[in-house]
Amino acid sequence: MILDVVRAGWMNLRRDRAAMMLSFIVPIVFFSIFYAVFGLQRSTTPRVKLAIVDEDRSTNSKRLIDALRNESALNIVQTPKKSTTPFTAATAEEYVRTGNAPIALVIPKGFGAAPIRFDSSSGTAAPTVHLLSDSADPIAPQIVGGLLQRTIMTAMPDVMATGGIDAVDRWSGGLTPKQRETLNANIAAFRAYSAKPRAQTTTGQSLIKIENTDVVGKKKRNTAVALYAAGIAVMFLLFTSAGAGGALLEEIDSGTLDRILSTRLTLTKLLLGKLAYLWSLGVAQLIVMFVWAAVAFRLELLQHITGFAIMTAATALASAAFGLVLASIARTRAQLSALSNLIVLSISALGGSMWPRFLMPPALQKAGLALFNAWALEGFTNVFWREEPLTSIVLPVVILAAWGIAFFLLARKLTQRWDVA
Amino acid sequence: MTVPLAITDVVKTFDGRRALDGVSLDLHEGEILGLLGPNGAGKSTLVRTIMGRVRPDRGEVRIFDRVAPAGESSARERVGVVPQEIALYPLLSARENLIVFGRYQGLSGAALDEAVDRALEWSVLSDRTDDPVKTFSGGMKRRLNMAVGTLHRPRILLLDEPTVGVDPQSRERIYGMIESLRGEGVSLIYTTHYMEEAERLCDRVAIIDHGRLIATGTKNELVRATVGDKREMIMVEKVPTLESVFLHLTGRELRE
């Protein structure tokens, strides 16, 4: 008897495509997405784009830059996009603030003369190297900071040795002229030796003084909410639109659609009405979520109200039309539920709602831009995180509107089966 | 004289199967025409063709002498539909359902308010106007289903099995609603599987099978055409039906 129950369960499951999809397809898809995001990067360190400002323009600063350029984990840029003028501290900060790179390195004047000091009491402390970072990416400063320390040791050992000798000279009561002469000769030989490229890994303690400034999040009252509110809001908006679009399927089941379409309402008008309803629902949901974030988590909503309004309208349009497409593909509520879970979770993962897109391999980051929700996140991030001017959301808004129109036309095409038989 | 509804030589094929095979039919003013036939005979396809939801491969539907192509709602402004399903929004109240469908029918303002009040009274739902439809009994839902279909005062009404799953009291009320429509001169096509219903309500009956109209006429005409004038006299003691016993015991008052 127990086996009969088991058999009946499997027989039912075999005929329930929606349950089959939820049980087997969704986990497989997610397994693959997680592997693509995290598994494929295991063999290599993620490349960090590093903007470098060389205020020193000395031999040592150039040696440091050259050495950093050889680091496979870094992608060095020294000029802004479409410009040949090297970065200044101001342009590099703007470059980071607008999301072009997660971090910038400022090599200050005087760095070349004394890049390393073992002895801070000498009165001539080494100049501080500045990192200008976007705290949206908390990994980049750690990678760059570590690589800086390592590069100093491995690429400029003569500089480190000179610093060490100066400290010995001071604390040992002074080197004799003969000792100084011999050491200088050896340092020269060491410099020549260390100039030869070779693979080497060394770890060491902090040799240069690094100061990190969060140029994007420093003024924010709540950095986490400013950064992640959009991701969460857009994901839930997609779920809501998909679920609400399912009302169409209920209307088919109950015969209401036939009744409606026998009135003056045409299918196109009905779909436009549904689109408008889903849009207004999406707008209301985003308003509720962001107001809650502002009240409970101190999100700076009022300061960015115009950008928020524009992004909300555009995102809700694309999301509403997307919900109509899902509803018009599915034949039943159960199918819609399985389909929407699969698609919404997948595009949320790839579009950046579940984790920041910079964590993904570059190819996946580029592929993510094909998804409309990635553009919604891009626009909201520009408004709330990077606090860019409204012109920065023109492209996301245009793309979202285009997706909205395309989705609606696709939904109309797919719903032809509901039209006159 | 203009006939409210004229169907001429309508043919419709679905996946190689003829659902309607040359059906021609007239519906006269104030007439109730019973549409009878086994399951899959083509009744629903014919009703959906009249509604404009099925495009015939051949033939035409004329409403008040005007050709009514499929999908053209303007030609069907004077047609009402009462589907077999309870095609209502279950979370909305009776009044809200009437308002929504009234607007879809182009009603607004005072005309809509008047139509909604009239429909609620007609369907004996005036005391439940603001309750969600999902809390209604089967009979109440059926009556509201009918009220929605007649909200815009159609001159032709398509009724698809309006008494399925209701208790005898509600059925009696629905019969009363149908009679009142006939009294107003509305022409009805009444689809049913219950022969006694057809016999009681319908002026004429059309029997459809395998997509073909196989007989049309009054009950007497059909009897003459099939059984003939020959009568067999059977002396029976008149025994009340179970339904008459039930109604005698429980009365004809609606109770919801």
Image (cartoon, helix red, strand yellow):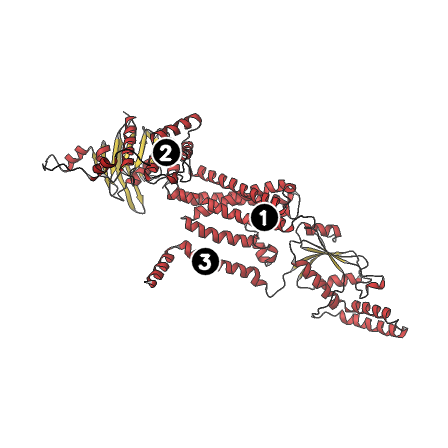
Work out whether residue B18 or residue B194 is closer to the camera in this orientation and state it. B194
Question: Secondary structure under badge 2?
Answer: helix
The label on residue A230 is 1
Tag 1 subunit: A
Could you tell me which residue is drawn at 54 percent across and 52 percent down?
Answer: A348
Residue type highlighted by circle 2:
Val
Which residue matches tag 2?
Answer: B148
The reply to whether residue A228 is visible in this rendering is yes
Work out whether residue B123 or residue A157 is closer to the camera in this orientation and state it. B123
Residue type highlighted by circle 1:
Ala
Work out whether residue A2 or residue A275 is closer to the camera in this orientation and state it. A2
Residue type highlighted by circle 3:
Ile
**Image location (x, y in percent) of residue B251:** 25, 34
Disc 1/disc 3 C-alpha distance (Å): 28 Å
The reply to whether residue B7 is visible in this rendering is no
Question: Mark 1 and 3 residues: CB-CB less than 8 Å, in contact?
Answer: no
Tag 2 subunit: B
Pointers 1 and 3 within a single chain: yes
Q: Is residue A144 left or right of residue A36?
A: right
